[in-house]
Each structure stands twice: as C-alpha cells, then as structure tokens.
Image (cartoon, grey):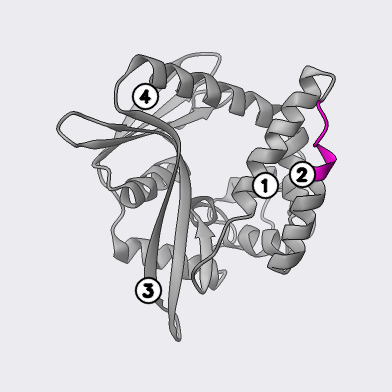
Amino acid sequence: MEKSELLKLAEALRNSVSSEPYSVQGLLYQWNLRDLLEHLVRDCDAAVCLTVTDLVYCSNKYHLRMLHPLPLIQQNIYAAWASHGRLIHRGLEDLLKTSWSGVETEVEVHKHLWISNGEKLLVRISGRLDALRVMENGEKIVYEFKSSRGDSEQPKAPHVLQVRIYMALAGASRACIVYVNPDRISEYWINNPIDDIELSQLVRETINNTKHPRYDWECSYCPYSIMCPYKKINSYPRRR
C-alpha cells in the first residue's frame, strides 16, 4: 500500500472513533486503534523508514504490512491480549513516573543510518520506549514492559534484541526488561547496546526480506500467515 493510501485509511479509521464510546470495551478499542495508527503512520525523512519492531521479527511481515495493513490493525485492535498488555504498560509507566525522578514515558527515539545495499541508502530507524530514566550522573536507562501468560524462556530473544536497539537509539548504557505474568514479576538487565555493524545487518535482512521468519514460532501468531509463502508452522489465530 502506498503511503498516501495508508494515510487515507488512517484518517478514515480516526474519523470512525471520533465520537465518545459508551462502554469500557469501546474505549479500549479506541485506545488500541489510536496507538497502532501512531505506530504505522510516521513521518519519513529517509529513503527507507523502519521501526524497531520491523527489525526484530520476520522480514516478510514488514513487507506484507506495507502492502496490507488491515490484518495487523484488526489483530491489535480487537484481540483481548492487546488491551491486556497496554493496560499493564500504562499502569507500570504511571508507577515509574510518579515514584522516581528523571523518568519519561512513551519516549520517541530514532536514528539515521547509511546502508550499503547495492546502493547507499539513508535509513531511519524509529521506536518508542516504554520508559527512559536519566540518573543524576547523566546515565540513561531504558525500561521495557512485557506481559505474558507464562514465564518460560525469559528473557526472550526478540525482546533482548529490541532493547539493545532501543539502547543505541536512546544513547543508554543499560536496559531493564520487566515481565508481568500470573506466576511472577521478573526483571532482566541488558548491558550491551547494539552497534552499527549489527544494526546495519538487521536493516539489510529486513529490506532484502531474507529472514522469514526470524523465529519459527512467529507464524503461530502472525495475521499474515494465511497469505505468506514462508509460513513454517501452525496457523493464525492461536490463543496465547
């Protein structure tokens, strides 16, 4: 889908939720939609614009999202787990902001990178941090919140990669991934931000569509599995 078409779609969806909802459920759907549209429709001042999420998951999902954004929008608006996760995020963000000094939440960060990919391309990589804390000595710490049904295999590989990229974009030296699930709340500290060499490789893999999927389990949760030629296992939808 061309950027202009996506903008038209976004405007139509925004207009569809312009009135005040009459239920908590409707309010949640509006919140989910506005949040997702902010993620999908961003200003682009480079040859290619990618989000951190584009880099840490299946490369073909990025290309399919650009062509067909509706399946991703529908998945993130109406799935109960999407609302559940956002509510946990909001609660933790408010807790940090009111309890600690030097905390900002929902922080937009970006980085420009020149990539050699047959030709030189200027790529913009953008993301939104759940929370960023600036200590009295100037040290920056990224906080990323995750909700899940269980606590196996933590910290998860894509989450570690995600915060390593966030650290590079924010100029942070440390990051903390906080998992919230029914069994426990756990924290994992990451101390190695990604460098430009590894980041450039991720960008090339995404642009050239060579990591599809990046993890075999992705297909189980992907709204594009029904149309994807690279599907590995299972089918969407599947309960988390």
Query: In which quadrant will I find the C terminus?
Result: top right
How far is mark 3 from mark 2, CA to CA? 34 Å
Query: Do labels 1 and 2 touch, CB within 8 Å?
Result: yes
Q: Earlier in the sequence, mark 4 or mark 3?
A: 3
| Magenta segment boundaries in residue numbering | 14-20
Q: Residues within 10 Å of mark 4 (few under 14, many from 20)?
A: some
Tell me where residue 111 sits by quadrant.
bottom left
How far is mark 2 from mark 4, CA to CA? 36 Å
Q: Which mark is residue 37?
A: 1
How far is mark 4 from mark 3, CA to CA? 34 Å
Q: Earlier in the sequence, mark 1 or mark 3?
A: 1
What residue is rendered at 26% in x and 46% in y? 192
Query: In which quadrant will I find the N terminus?
Result: bottom right
Q: Residues within 10 Å of mark 2 (few under 14, many from 20)?
A: some
How far is mark 1 from mark 3, CA to CA? 27 Å
| Residue marked by disc 2 | 14
Task: Give the amino acid type for the residue marked by disc 2 in the picture.
Answer: Arg
As displayed, is residue 12 above or below residue 183?
below
- Please identify, in this view, whether the residue under mark 4 or under mark 3 is nearer the observer: 3
| Residue marked by disc 4 | 187
